[in-house]
Image: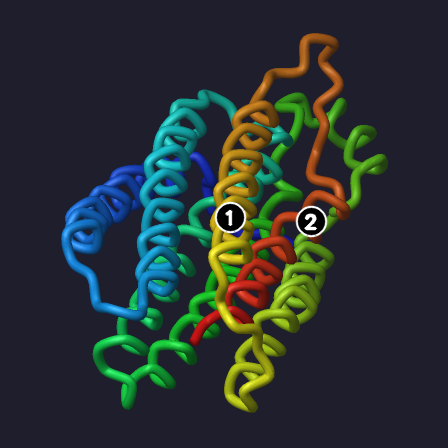
Amino acid sequence: MTVVEGHYDIRKGAAAYAPIIGAFGALAVPAITVLFTTSKSGNETLITLAAGLLVVAMLGSLASSIALAALGAEVDETANLPAAVMFIAVPVVISMISVLAAFEVLAAIYLPASKTLFAVMTGAGGLIGAYFTSFALGDCWRTGPSDPAVKATWQLTQWIKSPEQGHREAMRLAGISSLPATAGTILWLFEVKFTATPANVNALVGVGLAVAIAGTFWGVQRTAHAIDGDQKGLRWPEAYLTSCTASLFTLAVLVFLP
């Protein structure tokens, strides 16, 4: 009989990340203040884009840190927790991408020679976010009913049924979800992008904010305990929706960066 040794407790990870993510969002506040009190003639639209991205980062980080803290307070490793943390990871990744993109905008205004570096860093942030979001699949097979007899039958109805499948699907998801961020980076390097206007800047910031709020909300909803005892484990549409959404936002941001 094969003995599986060690696994990640997603609750402890969420509790540890919560203050880090919260501090990350708080650090965006002074940057926003500086932008609102500083301007460079002829670049008002880009200043607006940078400030808007930082606002998305601030709100997304603060909201997701509270959601992570709530997840860390869970007592049992129920099957809904991996899905919950993947949804909450969406605003976390969007916040990280938004900060990197805001720096690229500022580099384009004040340090044009360095903007390529910051654009590539934005794309890399999207890749890292897609990978870490996909990582939640690896040990999700261990969660579920605490009664071994009940779990054996319940496990047969789930998407991830074994550690081998969990790691295989995690790597597949990481590869697929990294494609939009990779494509966005390549498009930017070949200067296939759109000119930022007040309308599309507002739309981009609005979409980022809406997705961050939706990810936080649904992640918290996914932590709801099963009243009927039928735990709802991670499903493949949830896994691909969360990981690919973060990567697609990276693509959308990159094609609007100057």
How is this picture coloured?
rainbow
Residue located at (47% from left, 50% from top)? 205
Query: Looking at the image, is 12 positioned above or below residue 95?
Result: above
Question: Which disc number belongs to residue 18?
Answer: none
Secondary-structure class at tag 1: helix
Secondary-structure class at tag 2: helix
Looking at the picture, tell me which residue is in the foreground, 39 or 126. 39
Q: Which residue type does callout 2 highlight? A: Leu
Looking at the picture, tell me which residue is in the foreground, 224 or 148. 224
Q: Which residue type does callout 1 highlight? A: Gly
The crowding category of the residue bearing disc 2, from other C-alpha atoms within 10 Å (few below 14, some 14 to 19, many at least 20), is some
Quadrant of residue 133 within the rendered picture = bottom right
Location of mark 2 (residue)? 241
- Is residue 169 left or right of 205 when viewed as pictured? right
Find the residue positioned furthest to the top: 227
Looking at the picture, tell me which residue is in the foreground, 43 or 151. 43
Query: Looking at the image, is 99 positioned above or below residue 29?
Result: below
Q: Position of residue 156 (x, y in %)?
A: 84, 37
Residue located at (39% from left, 58% from top)? 49
Residue located at (40% from left, 57% from top)? 98
Which mark's residue is nearer the viewer, 2 or 1? 1
Q: Position of residue 23 (x, y in %)?
A: 22, 43
**Which of marks 1 and 2 precedes in the sequence?**
1
The crowding category of the residue bearing disc 1, from other C-alpha atoms within 10 Å (few below 14, some 14 to 19, many at least 20), is many
Task: Find the distance from the CA under tag 2 to the CA under tag 1.
Answer: 15 Å
Q: How many marks?
A: 2
- Is residue 168 left or right of 132 when viewed as pictured? right
Location of mark 1 (residue)? 208
Task: Judge whether residue 7 can be spotted in this image.
Answer: no
Quadrant of residue 61 within the rendered picture = top left
